[in-house]
């Protein structure tokens, strides 16, 4: 029926190890041994990483470890019937039926449909009973082929049955299911919810946002629904379609484990006038945050919207900064003096090159100009997407406008922050107005952008822009004017900030400060470029240090951490500080101080040596944009070694004593073995 599975990919009544890691490794080896993957280790690492995100055990003694991997050559199923069973995280105990789904990174929709059919079949008791009764691998292959040939349970109850069941309101629900991989849990949650809805006499239609093609729910079906269920581990695509509907939010695995409870909760929510609803900005009623957002503190909300702005801003800066650096490489520093680049582009073309045929100078001017224009979006993009984080799409136009005003007023990065917050709050407030029906359609596209821009940009021009500009300029002059010992202190502070939370808000503040000043650097003023170099070098230290630590003392780290350490070499070299997060999350009290110590050394050395970087990102791969590359590498190596040996020392000797808690086993810290 299909080439997804054969008898070489089935093992029955076998002891494959005592934990999930051992079982997954064995199954990955089976796939590689069958010639369907380039090697065991790459597939194993990807599958284990997926397992660590969300346990793949489901009720009924079943587990479905799965992943997409560059190592996979052909979509494949490997099956094991375990004796003894192994705990894969299901609430009802360990699993003895294991299906390992290995999909290529670019798996086609047909294969993904077949894999989702299998996942759906595994919630059927007769199918799993047949799997346990099978005598030979050939029996298993026949059962799987039969399941893949059958039409799977639909994502909605049949129309006639649903109509008969919907005898009293509220009896209509819609749901969205989605998991990070989009292969198994997405579809199993959908079918579990559908079965539970049938038993409860409820009409339910589900939109599965998996890896394959997505069929959106009919708008009329959504409009008729009494409540919405989001069983997802990722953001819901097109959430605005459900605006105003009562909503239940939960991880996708709960849709498999407790579908009946979720159905009952959704029905209860549908009749509760105080229930949380899907946000609906700019409509007839005030936008209401869902349960998760409603429970957040003000500080958490502010942090989220600020990080939203920074994350959307970075692509403008990264591309622009690299182009500026390329312009200097090709055309020299003189390309930035006065209007030199503009003059070249105005008076010359590819057919009329400057300086008697200097192609490098002309291309340098092109790269410099494009990069400069890209960098000019830094503050408007920051402000626009801060406003977006508060008020959704209606906030973007007021935010960008406020950011442009901040640039005009010279208030820079701080002005963009303030302008974005004001624009977002203004758009959110205006969107809460109750307006006549004839005006509702104009609110998000005309009224909110117009009034939001007037409020936020007007306040910036009339009251706030000047004082913020004065403060911002004074702060920048003070920081960038540091030299000697004070510059080293600044390098230490920036290094500590970059390594404190590894991509979190403190890290982003230091990075944003460096990026905001990048465009002001010049041949006569290297200070902004020195700050950028210190920030980038320090940010490279944590993943590189943890990669080195896993080599120095392997036994202090788990198998998963050693696998993460291999990837951390490339992540660190690329300036992706988040490569150290798995280590910090598992052992923060020993990892984070170690990283901060190394980062402080690196930042201090960079500033003391006058290392510069004209690129805001890229790590060692933008070597052409780094001045004094030798000291740049030296600073990174010193920080890496300091952090690596510090964390190893702490794991060896700074071991927490086991703590006994009432009704719970002893808690032994990582590294105490």
Image (spheres, rainbow, N blue to C red):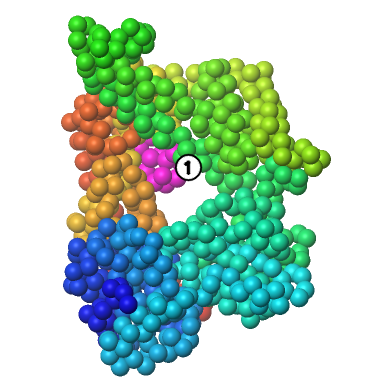
Residue 215 coordinates in the image, percent (x, y) = 52, 59
- Disc 1 on helix, strand or loop? helix
- Up the image or down, 626 lies above or below 100; here it is above
Q: Which residue is pictured at 22% across the width and 46% down the height?
A: 641
Taking the spot 57% from the left edge, 73% from the top edge, the residue there is: 193
225 sits to left or right of 397: right
Magenta range: 493-509
- Quadrant of the frame with the C terminus: bottom left
**Viewer can see residue 672:** no
x, y percentage for residue 344?
31, 9
From the image, tell me which residue sits under label 1.
505
Q: Nearer the viewer, residue 421 or 480?
A: 421
Q: Nearer the viewer, residue 487 or 505?
A: 505
Q: Nearer the viewer, residue 437 or 227?
A: 437
Image position, residue 140 (x, y; %): 32, 85
Quadrant containing the N terminus is bottom left
Instruction: Identify which residue, 258 or 240, lies in the foreground.
Output: 240
Quadrant in the rendering for residue 135: bottom left
């Amino acid at each position: 029926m299909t080439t997804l599975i054969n008898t070489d990919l089935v093992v029955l009544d076998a002891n494959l190890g005592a934990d999930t890691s051992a079982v997954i490794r064995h199954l990955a080896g089976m796939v590689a041994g069958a010639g369907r993957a380039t090697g065991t280790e790459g597939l194993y690492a990807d599958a284990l990483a997926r397992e660590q995100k969300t346990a793949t055990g489901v009720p009924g003694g079943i587990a479905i470890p799965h992943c997409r991997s560059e190592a996979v050559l052909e979509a494949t199923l490997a099956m094991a019937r375990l004796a003894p069973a192994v705990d894969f995280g299901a609430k009802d105990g360990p699993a003895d039926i294991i299906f390992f789904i290995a999909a290529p990174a670019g798996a086609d929709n047909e294969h993904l449909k077949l894999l989702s059919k299998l996942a759906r079949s595994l919630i059927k008791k007769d199918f799993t009973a047949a799997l346990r009764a099978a005598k030979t691998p050939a029996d298993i292959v026949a059962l799987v082929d039969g399941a893949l040939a059958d039409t799977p349970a639909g994502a909605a109850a049949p129309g006639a049955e649903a109509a008969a069941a919907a005898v009293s309101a509220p009896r209509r629900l819609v749901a969205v299911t989605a998991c990070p991989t989009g292969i198994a849990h997405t579809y199993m949650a959908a079918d579990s919810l559908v079965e539970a809805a049938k038993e409860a006499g409820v009409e339910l239609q589900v939109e599965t946002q998996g890896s394959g093609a997505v069929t959106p729910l009919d708008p009329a079906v959504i409009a008729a629904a009494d409540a919405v269920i989001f069983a997802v581990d990722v953001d819901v695509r097109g959430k605005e379609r459900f605006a105003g509907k009562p909503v239940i939010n939960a991880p996708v695995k709960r849709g498999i484990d407790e579908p009946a409870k979720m159905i009952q909760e959704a029905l209860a929510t549908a009749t509760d006038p105080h229930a949380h609803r899907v946000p609906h900005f700019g409509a007839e009623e005030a936008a209401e945050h869902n349960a998760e957002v409603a429970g957040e503190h003000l500080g958490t909300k502010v942090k989220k919207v600020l990080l939203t702005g920074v994350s959307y801003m970075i692509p403008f800066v990264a591309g622009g900064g690299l182009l500026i650096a390329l312009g200097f490489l090709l055309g020299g520093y003189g390309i930035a003096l006065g209007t030199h680049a503009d003059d070249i582009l105005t008076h010359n073309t590819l057919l009329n090159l400057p300086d008697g045929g200097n192609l490098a100078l002309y291309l340098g001017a092109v790269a410099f100009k494009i990069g400069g224009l890209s960098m000019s979006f830094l503050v408007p993009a920051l402000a626009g997407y801060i406003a977006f984080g508060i008020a959704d799409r209606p906030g973007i136009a007021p935010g960008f406008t406020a950011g442009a005003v901040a640039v005009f007023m010279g208030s820079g990065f701080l002005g963009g922050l303030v302008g974005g917050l004001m624009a977002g709050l203004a758009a959110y407030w205006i969107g809460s107005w109750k307006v006549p029906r004839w005006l509702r359609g104009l609110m998000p596209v005309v009224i909110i952008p117009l009034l939001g821009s007037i409020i936020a940009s007007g306040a910036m021009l009339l009251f706030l822009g000047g004082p913020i500009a004065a403060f911002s300029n004074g702060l920048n002059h003070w920081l960038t004017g540091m030299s000697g010992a004070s510059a080293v202190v600044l390098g230490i502070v920036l290094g500590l900030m970059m390594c404190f939370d590894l991509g979190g808000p403190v890290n982003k503040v230091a990075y944003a400060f460096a990026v905001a000043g990048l465009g002001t650097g010049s041949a006569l003023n290297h200070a902004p470029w020195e700050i950028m170099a210190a920030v980038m070098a320090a940010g490279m230290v944590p993943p590189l240090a943890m990669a080195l630590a896993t080599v120095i003392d392997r036994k202090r780290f788990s198998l998963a951490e050693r696998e993460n350490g291999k990837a951390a070499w490339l992540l660190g070299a690329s300036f992706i500080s988040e490569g150290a997060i798995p280590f910090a999350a598992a052992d923060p009290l020993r990892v984070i101080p170690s990283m901060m110590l190394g980062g402080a050394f690196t930042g201090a050395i960079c500033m003391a040596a006058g290392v510069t970087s004209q690129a805001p990102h890229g790590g060692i791969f933008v070597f052409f944009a780094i001045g004094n590359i030798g000291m740049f590498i030296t600073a990174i190596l010193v920080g890496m070694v300091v952090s690596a040996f510090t964390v190893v020392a702490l794991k060896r000797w700074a071991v927490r004593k086991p703590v006994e808690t009432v009704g719970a086993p002893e808690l032994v810290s990582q590294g105490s073995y």
